[in-house]
Amino acid sequence: MDHRPKYRLIVAVTEDWAIGKDGDMLVRNPCDLKRFKRLTTGHTVIMGRRTLESLPGGRPLPNRANIVLTRSGDAQGEGYRTARGLKEAKALVASEEDEVFVIGGETVYRSLLPWVDECLVTLHHVRRPDADTWFPDLDAIDGWTLSEREPGGTTPDGTPFEYLTYVRE
């Protein structure tokens, strides 16, 4: 039997499922960034080209195997590998990997959502109608169930947040 890692999607959203504006996150949440680092370090992360470019210095995340999905497949850089689609990305995942994290952006989330086992959602209790990128509302999609709800805290600007885990039925 072939080993198949668990595919987990990790995303920060607002109450209206917004995730970004002008290539940036909507809410500054240092606590959530620490959690993201703790969960993803030592694992493979899959992201789109624009997400890579939005990272500090446009560099891949340290201490993780970085796979960048790009339509052309031509983008190359130090510290990451590229794939033109999910099949190529899966082929790049190390055979011993137990968990793979899909980390954005919007197009990658939407494309890979049917393939992930679990969604780790940081829900910020604020609405951002000015956003320009959105995550699908998991509460409105058949096949996804909210399995866990954990208190998060409050961001430095006073926005309350919580951690939600959705699993595929």
Image: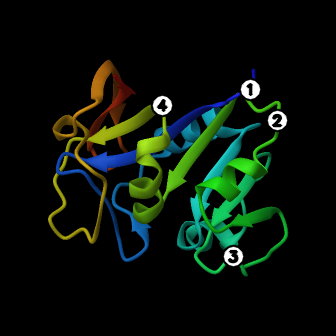
| Alpha carbons under labels 1 and 2: distance apart | 7 Å
Position of residue 83 in the picture relative to residue 120 (left or right): right
C-beta proximity under 8 Å, tags 1 and 2 = yes
| Mark 4 or 1, nearer chain start | 1
Q: Tell me what residue is drawn at x 71 percent, y 38 percent.
A: 41
Q: As shown in the figure, which amino acid type bears the numbered disc 2?
A: Ser
Mark 4 sits on what residue?
A: 117
Q: Tell me what residue is drawn at x 68 percent, y 48 percent.
A: 90
Q: Nearer the viewer, mark 4 or mark 1?
A: 1
Q: Which mark is residue 3?
A: 1
Q: As shown in the figure, which amino acid type bears the numbered disc 4?
A: Asp
Give the position of the C terminus as an image quadrant. top left
Answer few, some or many: residues within 10 Å of disc 4's Cα (few below 14, many 20 plus, some between 14 and 19).
some
| Mark 3 or 2, nearer chain start | 3
Seen in the picture, residue 105 relative to 102 is either above or below; the reply is below
Answer few, some or many: residues within 10 Å of disc 2's Cα (few below 14, many 20 plus, some between 14 and 19).
few
| Alpha carbons under labels 2 and 4: distance apart | 18 Å
Q: As shown in the figure, which amino acid type bears the numbered disc 1?
A: His
Seen in the picture, residue 67 relative to 114 is either above or below; the reply is below
Mark 3 sits on what residue?
A: 73
Residue 109, percent across and down? 43, 54
| Mark 2 or 4, nearer chain start | 2
| Alpha carbons under labels 4 and 1: distance apart | 15 Å
Q: Secondary structure at mark 3?
A: loop
| Alpha carbons under labels 3 and 2: distance apart | 22 Å
Mark 2 sits on what residue?
A: 95
C-beta proximity under 8 Å, tags 2 and 4 = no
Quadrant in the picture for residue 5: top right
